[in-house]
Image (spheres, helix red, strand yellow):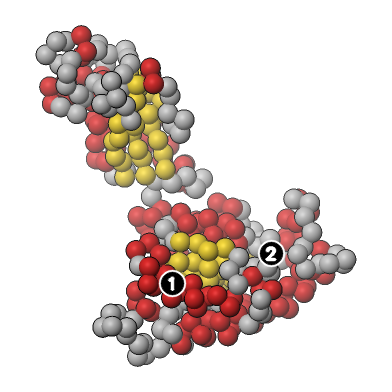
Amino acid sequence: MSEARTTGDRMDDPETVDGQVAAESETTLVVVTGLSGGGRSTVARALENVGYYVVDNLPQALMLDMAELAFKAGGAARRTAMVLDVRSRAFSTDLAGAIHELKDRGFSPRVVFVDADDEVLIRRFESVRRSHPLQGDGRLADGIAVERGLLEEARDQADVIIDTSHLNVNQLRRRIEELFGGEDARRLRVTVLSFGFKYGLPPDADFVLDARFLPNPYWVPELREHTGREEAVSAYVLGQEGADAFVASYADLVNATTAGFEREGKRYLTVAVGCTGGKHRSVAIAEELAGRLRHSGLAANAQHRDLGRE
């Protein structure tokens, strides 16, 4: 279960610097905090998946410095998430004051608070055989109670509160991606990678396709010096018996599995297509397969690991 609410302390007249638009409108800040064991690390990884620069265990005293650095750096750093835990709060317990200071300087941070029932937190700590960072010589429940007290004000002022008691890792990740990612960031991206078997298998391949059953253009004198990216070679390869069915069957396979991969949190899929040297057959097949996947609505591109290597 999760609840979201917004705060209304946004500045009406943010300052500008050297004629630029204010930092508030150019920098997206997310502050992640909450109970130990509540799922902060999962939230951090999900934010990284959707393009945020994530700073873990940042002392509250450095939050404003980090925000201004992100604004000045520009580019990808303009989407920055700061993760605070009990180690971070060793420098200060005034998260409310740190957030107010950010707003005074023109930023509009969104505070995400992860929470869970005490019984759930205890089970999670026990399952990994860890003590709570604040329990000292007491029980797990004592450490959780101390941390709840320290975080009461932070929870009250959070923009987004996510109760992870009944969420698994994938459900929590999807929740964060829905809130901060946008549709494009959540899409599975497919790389169709051609390669030559004589140079070894790509270690990151999720699927490996073998195009060596097709006649090799290397043995056609007028095609030998050309590559599978060129029309003559591509037409020769794709015109062979079984080539079209080969590409179509693997396009169907990838399309049939992408929804499941996305549900499981996979964001990048590599389909490796091999031939002997990675110059003719695999290149032509990879280009054709990537095109068909794009036509079906997937974000797909073709890359050629060994092209030009011979």
The answer, for residue 256, to whether it is visible in the render is: no
**Picture quadrant where residue 69 is located:** bottom left
Q: Identify the residue shown where x is 38% and y is 17%.
A: 198
Q: Could you tell me the amino acid type at mark 1?
A: Leu
Task: Provide the residue designation for mark 2.
Answer: 36
Query: Looking at the picture, how far across and down is residue 222, in whole percent?
Result: 11, 13
Query: From the viewer's perspective, is 214 left or right of 105?
Result: left
In the picture, the quarter occupied by the N terminus is bottom right
**Picture quadrant where residue 73 is located:** bottom left
Please tell me which residue lies in front, 28 or 285: 28
Q: Residues within 10 Å of mark 1 (few under 14, many from 20)?
A: few
In the picture, the quarter occupied by the C terminus is top left
| Position of 234 relative to 26 (above/below) | above
Query: From the viewer's perspective, is 69 left or right of 60?
Result: left
Q: Residues within 10 Å of mark 2 (few under 14, many from 20)?
A: many
Q: Nearer the viewer, mark 1 or mark 2?
A: 1
Q: Could you tell me the amino acid type at mark 2?
A: Ser
Please tell me which residue lies in front, 18 or 38: 18
Mark with earlier residue (1, 2): 2
| Position of 275 relative to 39 (above/below) | above
C-alpha span from label 1 to label 2: 28 Å
Badge 1 marks a residue whose secondary structure is helix
Query: From the viewer's perspective, is 224 left or right of 290?
Result: left
Q: Identify the residue shown where x is 68% and y is 69%.
A: 86
Query: Looking at the picture, how far across and down is residue 285, in whole percent?
Result: 27, 25
